[in-house]
Amino acid sequence: MTPLRAIAGIMYVETLHLLRYRTQAFIFLVIPLLIFVFLAGVYWDQVILHIPTVILDMDHSPMSQEIIQGVEAHETLDIVGYATDYDQVQYWLQTEKARVAIVIPEDFDRKASRGEPTRILAIIDGSNMVFTNVATAATGEVVNHLAANLRTNLMLSQGLLTDKVRRILQAVQFPIGARYNPTFNYAYFLLFGLGLYILQQTYLLGMATVISREREQGTWIQYQVLPFGRGAIYVGKLLPYLVVGLVQAGLIFLLGARVFGMPMHGKLWLLFLVTATFLLTVSTFGILVSGCTSRVNSIRFTMVMAMPSFILSGFTWPLDAMHPIARTIGECLPLTWYLQAFQSITMKGAGWGVVAPHIFNLAIITTVCFVLSLRFIKKTDRPPYRLIARVYPLLGKPANRYANW
Amino acid sequence: MQILRNIASIAYVEWLTMTRDKFLAAVVFGAGFFYLSLFGLVYCSAILTDIPVAVVDQDHSPASRELVQKLASNPRLDIVSYLGDSQEMDKQLEANLVRAGIVIPKNFAKDIASGNPVRVQATVDGCNLIYAYNLRKAILDINRSVGTDIMASTLVGAGIEPARAEDILKSVQFVSESRYNPTYNYVNFLYLLLVIIAVQQTCLLGEGLTLAREKEQNTWVQFALSPLRNVEIFIGKVLPYYLVLLANAGLVLAGAYIFLKLPMHGNLLLLWLVFAVFALAIVGLGYWISSCCRDTAQATMVICLFNLPMALGSGFTWPHASMTPLVKYIGYLFPATWMTHATRAITMKAASWEVVWTDIVILAIMAMFFVSGAVISTRKIRSVPD
């Protein structure tokens, strides 16, 4: 029997195992896509529009009307009501009937047209920063527009010419363009990252049982006596998962790009290469865990280890802003490098030069896991009797019970 | 009396199982603290500062250098490279070396002096919106202060008295206040969600195994044949987890309050009430899941996959109003949705009973539903097939 046929045989057995446990097969095969679709539903609007806004107009003047019209015309802000006093504004903000309150003070019109200082207050609910960021920009736009008009009038009344006034007001401008994501689209930012994190989770769940299951059933010893070496066994056991994982990743990309309109620039072969490397890294980690403990414990362990990986990956809150300990842990995780490479390729269209260091890091993690797995994988579920026989005499305990092992 | 004794003995056995299984004990007692300390380390700086920025100064004049200094003095920005042209800036943006690039055009000083409009182009990397929003805010702040200075000098240059010029520029001031979280603190925003999800998951991971383990080890037959009532079994089995969940939540919140300065403005008694109702729903759910699963491995898998959809479907970060209706209604079915809403209102906004009573009532209904489901499921799996 050639090694190739052996690999094919191991693959076949592994596929049978994969499909045998119905729940596990369902979780492994279907759940990542289902959750991805769910998440796409979560970020359905992609940008925040229609933020409920309450207005407290204590002036009731033409100019305050102008502000209200400005708020109404802004696509991000929706006026949901007019408050009569400040307490009501407080109450609306507290009960989340409104996320933004705009307070126009008394005598606003009179003071503003005379050129006396006056101020408009925008209170923004800071408890949810998704609203805060969008609402700060939107209210700023509305009020700045009004302020510019007002200044124009004041300058004209000072005898300046229209053209001069325009030039003064536009003296310095900082137009801000958000490269790669011009509309500050939240789904562009998060959707793929979260989807791939879930793929990692289900993939690990599949991998976690690869060896522990065999050991639990007493069949791992059969693999040990095969004349092909561990390489062939690992390859045979990994390949079915790797193929399924790649197909799933492909489906997630396809769904994301075609159905949900996510950006997908960059070279496909590079994306494929990075994804395959990442899945390989995760596989070796799964094998390492699977080889060291029982089936249940390896499932628990992989889950407990992998759960915080998204937050630690620096995909949202940047690695640079973390405490050095958290940052170091984050840098040891494959997801960190994969998501960075993925984002660079799909959103920025980055080439090999940018992505290569990330692939290199993934390769290092793979190697470390692989070497550790060669060293630590247990052959059977028996306790490490040889070790016990050596250590017990040192502790002054009888070791002869284990002499036979 | 006998009922209480039965419950106590079942709870005692469950407590023993929980504390003797090393892994289970680690998950139930330690995992919450482990995760939350880890997340505390992740978000410990809470406010994003020193974002790497590139500057392309094509003017090289005193005025442009002054502007660069203004940029550098903003705490959110850290100018890491001074480049010759914007192509280099594009490369650095692509390679994630900088998160924004600011191009000061040629003739910047000359145009300002002659009163011609000047455009300083700022390009922000939009891939990570946490960077992008912070950068946008910082650049707008600088724009406002620089713009006002220059406008003032031009107005004076156009023959308007300095005092009058100041009046014109300060005629309308726009004050934007971020209520409840004035410093845009990320910990205040996100940490509460992590606390609730972590506490919930560790409880579910412990509780979800209770019946599955008995089935796996064939010890369930003792319960199946005993004369104990379903309610007694249920209460006895969930009691240890219920108490541990409440203790964990209390300790974690206290830790977050002390070490991360998480706001805790509202009524603590009300907060405790919300947690008590929520915990009831969670132990009910855990017990129910456990009764449906074949073995502990299956229960663990099912529970582990819940956390992300629950966290994001809760509307705590991305609001329900911007989700597709189906997902929104699914989100309404998670206890965490109402729980996170109520706790945020209480801790950050000092909300009273009138504000959060709907959340508490919905949680109570869910708790009732899950608990009855759990008790009924006990009956179902107690019937021994022939």
Image: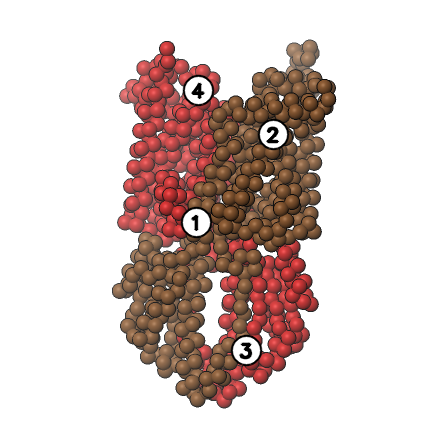
| Residue A76, quarter of picture | bottom left
* Label 4: how many Cα within 10 Å (few below 14, some 14–19, many 20+): some
Q: Secondary structure at mark 2?
A: helix
User: Seen in the image, is B246 located left or right of residue A254?
Assistant: left
Label 4, label 2: how far apart the Cα atoms are:
33 Å
Give the colour in which the image draws chain A.
brown
B357 lies above or below A56: above
Q: Which numbered disc, 3 or 4, marks the residue closer to the eye?
A: 3
Do dots 1 and 2 share one subunit?
yes
A371 lies above or below A190: above
User: Seen in the image, is A63 located left or right of residue A211?
Assistant: left
The quarter in which the C terminus of chain A is drawn is: top right
Q: Which numbered disc, 4 or 2, marks the residue closer to the eye?
A: 2
**Residue B95 position in % (x across, y down):** 65, 55
Q: Chain of mark 4?
A: B
Q: Which residue is mark 3?
A: B117
Which chain does red denote in the image? B
Mark linked to residue A44: 1
Q: Amino acid at mark 3?
A: Pro
Q: Which residue is mark 2?
A: A240
